[in-house]
Each structure stands twice: as structure tokens, then as C-alpha cells.
Image (cartoon, rainbow, N blue to C red):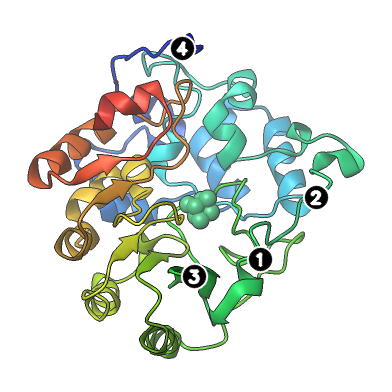
Amino acid sequence: MLEQPYEYAARELVEPDWRRLPGFADVTDEQWRSAQWQRAHCVKNVRQLHGVYGDLLDESFYADVEADQAGRATMSLLLPPQMVNTMAAGGDGTAVPTTARMLADPVRRYMLPVASDRLPGAAASHPYAARDSLHEHEMWAVEGLTHRYPTKVLAELLSTCPQYCGHCTRMDLVGNSTPAVAKLRFELKPVDRQAAMLDYLRRTPGVRDVVVSGGDVANLPFRTLEAFVASRMSRTLSISSRPATNASRFLNGRLATSPPETTTSRTPGVARRYSSIAVCRSTGFSSNFSLGTAGVELPTRSMRVQWPQYCGQVDSSSASTLVG
Ligand code: SF4
């Protein structure tokens, strides 16, 4: 028998105190737990980042972010406050961020890349890196519908997410253009694109697994999602960020990045009604990451109680304590 090379260990989940960040010092509990407040106070540029951290970080850090955005960044900035608050928080959630802590923080590395993270010149990227690395656009049967496998399709219903990750493999389509990447744009109106997808699916009976994604379905009005899903309910349906199995899955990166959104959104209800299994594919949990907080744990447990099929598709010991 092979020895387990990784020691899994649960850790106590804590909610870092957002008031340790100057820009959130006066934010009340009620505001912090409001999905609307979280959305309205996302960090979208260096000026807003400065407004959150102020003088805690050296000017060199802000210049480093700016240099990356102007040069190599493939995704624009979009950071929900909940996610900002998990960076450089220390194990007990009380650490005051410093430039050195921020530079070393794993969530910061993938959500807020800086120019100095990257190797110089061509080494900054993998030699085979491509803007559409999974060749999804090449396999569009109709706009936004990738038909790679005989029985399975990926429906990209929208091209936005509640947060933008620096490593996004769909950076070709998802998010705002950056100086380095002019994004592909859907040409059809959403209603026409979805009609074209449904028409293709009607004409292609071999497809039995439809993965509804984007972007992130958390950004889709629930009525739009329900209309699309309902029209396919006679067949196996998957709702996920990535095609994986024939089980029905539900993407909800929002659980980790804005827990209040998960408890107030009606989108999980759509997945619950039309899917057999729902999966929260949270955004990049790992045992060292601090995304798993007490604020994420509570709505996760609540969803598990209300929705027994709900389970996690995450890759860490810390996350397994949330969803197991
Ligand atoms: S949530 Fe997923 S699709 Fe959206 S930016 Fe992050 S990696 Fe890309």
C-alpha cells in the first residue's frame, strides 16, 4: 500500500477582522454581511486598493500592481472585500498586512498579481501558454457552446465573474480587456445566444450532459438561468465551472468570495430544483490558503442542511473541513 504523502489536518476557521484594514475600519457587521455592500465595494483599481490598505503597504507595492496591470496581466482587478480580508491575515486572522506579508500571501498571488511575481522576458509564461489554452472557442458549435465530447457540451452563458483570478484559463473571453489581452466578445445578444444554444441542443440529441458555466453563473439573473435550465430538464444537466463528470454540478465560487451572496441568491435554488447533485467548486482553496473562514463555514453548513445533495469539489484539507 502506498503511503499517504500529504498529512491532512483540520484547522479552526476564523473570520479575519476586516476593521484591521484602514478602508474597512468603520464597516459595521451588518454592512459586511450584506451581499449588496460586498458587491458595491469590490476593489477594481489601484486607487481603490490604496483606499483599503492605505499606508500599511509601501508605495512600491501599489506601483508593482500597476506595472503588472499595464504590462503582463491577463485579467483586470476585481476583488470582493471578503476575499481582500483573507489576504495576509495570519493564522488567527489578526495580522496587520505589511508589504512583505502581502507579497508572500498565496491568495494575493493569484488574485492580485504584481509585476515582480513574474520571471523576466519570455520566461514569464509557459512556452505553450495560449490565451484560449483549452481551445474552447475553436470548438464552439454555436456562439458560446463548446462541443468537445460526443455527449457533453459546455455552455458559456456569460463572460463575467464576481471576481477575476489572475490565472484564469478562460481569460480569452472572461472579464474586461487589459493592455495585454483584448478579450473576445460575444456578438449575439444573450437571449439570441441562449436560443441558438438550445436550438443546437434540440438538433443534437446525442448530447446528454450540459455544463452551464461562464464566467460564473453567480452573475446570471436567476430567471435567465432557470429559463435555460428548465428547457433542458428532460435531460441530464450539469451546472459547473468545468466539465468533469456526468453528474449535475453547480458552480459557486461566490461561496468563498462573498458568503452573504450564497445565502441570499436564488441561483442555488435553481440548481437544487433541476440538478441531481450540486457541487460548489470554490475558487482555489488549498491548505495554506485563508479563503476558508468562519464566515464561509456557516453558509456552507446551512446549505448542506437544506440541500443534502450539496457537496464540495475542493482540493484542500482546510476546505474539507467545510464541506465534508
Ligand atoms: S472564477 Fe473561474 S472563470 Fe472566473 S476569473 Fe476566476 S478562474 Fe476565471
Amino acid carrying mark 1 in the image: Ser
User: Mark 2 vs mark 3: which is more N-terminal?
Assistant: 2
Q: CA distance from mark 3 to mark 4?
A: 36 Å
Amino acid carrying mark 3 in the image: Pro
Q: Look at the picture and state if 57 lies above or below 238.
A: above
Amino acid carrying mark 4 in the image: Gln
From the image, state whether disc 2 or disc 3 is nearer to you: 3
User: Mark 3 vs mark 4: which is more N-terminal?
Assistant: 4
**How crowded is the residue under tag 3: few (<14 C-alpha within 10 Å), some, or many (20+)?**
few
Q: Look at the picture and state if 98 lies above or below 150.
A: above
Q: CA distance from mark 3 to mark 1?
A: 32 Å
Camera-side residue of 209 and 312: 209
| Residue identified by numbered label 3 | 150
Q: Secondary structure at mark 3?
A: loop
* Callout 4: CB less than 8 Å from ligand 1: no
User: Mark 4 vs mark 2: which is more N-terminal?
Assistant: 4
| Residue identified by numbered label 1 | 177
User: Mark 3 vs mark 1: which is more N-terminal?
Assistant: 3
Marks 4 and 2: CB-CB under 8 Å? no
60 with respect to 76 (left or right) = right
State the image coordinates of residue 193 (x, y, percent, origin top left): 45, 85
**How crowded is the residue under tag 1: few (<14 C-alpha within 10 Å), some, or many (20+)?**
some
